[in-house]
Image (cartoon, grey):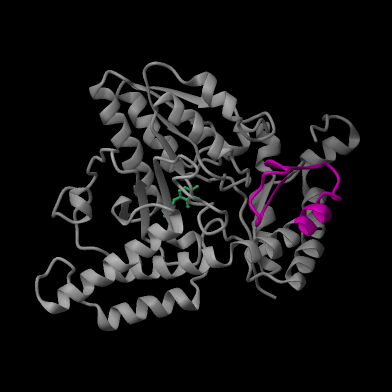
Amino acid sequence: MQVYADNAATTKMSDIAIAAMTDCYYKYYGNPSSLHSVGQEAKEKLEDARARIAACLGCEPREIYFTSGGSEADNQAIISAARLGAKKGKKHIISTAFEHHAVLHTLQRLENEGFEITLLDVRNGHNITAQQVKDAIREDTCLVTVMYANNEIGSILPIPEIGAICKEAGVPFHTDAVQAVGHLHINVKEQNIDMLSLSAHKFHGPKGVGVLYARRGIALQNLIDGGAQERGKRGGTENLPGICGLAAALEDACAHIDENAAKVSAMRDKLIAGLSQIPHCALNGDPVNRLPGNVSFCFEGIEGEALLLYLDAHGICASSGSACTSGSLDPSHVLLAIGRVHDVAHGSLRLSLDHNNTDEEIDHILTAVPQVVTLLRNMSPVWRDLQNGTREYIL
Ligand SMILES: *Cc1c(COP(=O)(O)O)cnc(C)c1O
């Protein structure tokens, strides 16, 4: 049995998205900037996709900017707000300690350029409160950037409340909603979101295409200089097949949010209940405000990478949530940010489900994980020390 449980990393494309792209490759091969009829047909297709995406997010089509994915959208949003802030002498940015690297590394770059970054503490409940944002806002704050939902541990942040606070304070508010779009109900106007990043491959669309929504009145910087595409804010011939695939996947996902969330969260809860029975483990992430598909645990006395390899041998595709950066086995910054100590953070497992998963697959995972954890613990010197009392249990 092959079980794909790594949907937070990427998803399988839907038939609907593939069909939309294929149609585009065959029929709409023109350059949307060309004045002839083939170009103009492609232009119409592009603007049709933009309007459909805007409808899904509750904004105007001209507030949608196409990008190469979530990372580029995050970079463009943050750098735009920072450049604008710097012009007004405002160089303070608020974010959280468990953002995606596309956000954290961009903030790091700005910090090196003299910006001051406040990363909100996420140890309490593995989440932040809107009050934390309110307390951190200063006269010189030029941006609040807070993710909609965390990709490793599944916590859903109080975005509408944060949006209201930022609006009241007059501070631009960006959210990396890559894990949330297509899975949670989002309306950028009602939720007071000024900028939002999304990526097609996280909701069964193609890789390499995303969107930055930027409210009218937000001055975007170009990351890519070139032609007049995307209202002059992002040069380069548009990735029309990708954009058509994104629009089709987004409409499909948004039409089925409630039905998918009900199905997926039932499987998630069964997995969480079953895996919680394993001794000396802990659930990561907000237990209540949680993505429908996210299951994240730490198991004491084992290495997450070994767990993944053994699970792969059982046909289960999962993730440790810990990034092994070129040779150095650093534990995940997200797990450290929520307060897991290094040893515990190393024994992590993330299973991210979607509506294609089945109850049989959940049962298979529930059989395999406890077996593999026991097997690895029996081989582990750390576990032996814990068992014979020469080392203290943390979990
Ligand atoms: C996947 C992901 C990204 C990056 O999106 P890409 O399209 O792969 O660049 C950014 N933020 C979060 C929260 C993600 O899960």
Residue 91, relative to residue 220: is it above or below? Answer: above
Q: Quadrant of residue 47?
A: bottom left
Q: Is residue 30 visible?
A: no
Q: Residue at x 66, y 73 (%)?
A: 2
Q: In the drawing, does residue 35 fall left or right of residue 316?
A: left
Q: In the drawing, does residue 215 fall left or right of residue 289?
A: left
Picture coordinates of residue 19, whole percent (x, y): 41, 80
Q: Residue at x 53, y 44 (%)?
A: 148
Picture coordinates of residue 57, whole percent (x, y): 44, 54
Magenta residue check for 282? yes
Indicate the quadrant containing the C terminus: top left, top right, bottom left or bottom right. Answer: top right
Picture coordinates of residue 50, whole percent (x, y): 33, 62
Q: Residue furthest left?
A: 35
Q: Residue at x 44, y 45 (%)?
A: 189
Indicate the quadrant containing the N terminus: top left, top right, bottom left or bottom right. Answer: bottom right
Q: Toward the viewer: 111 or 50?
A: 50
Q: Which residues are magenta?
A: 269-297
Q: Toward the viewer: 34 or 308?
A: 34
Magenta residue check for 238? no
Q: Residue at x 54, y 39 (%)?
A: 159
Picture coordinates of residue 147, whole percent (x, y): 51, 41
Q: Toward the viewer: 392 or 44?
A: 44
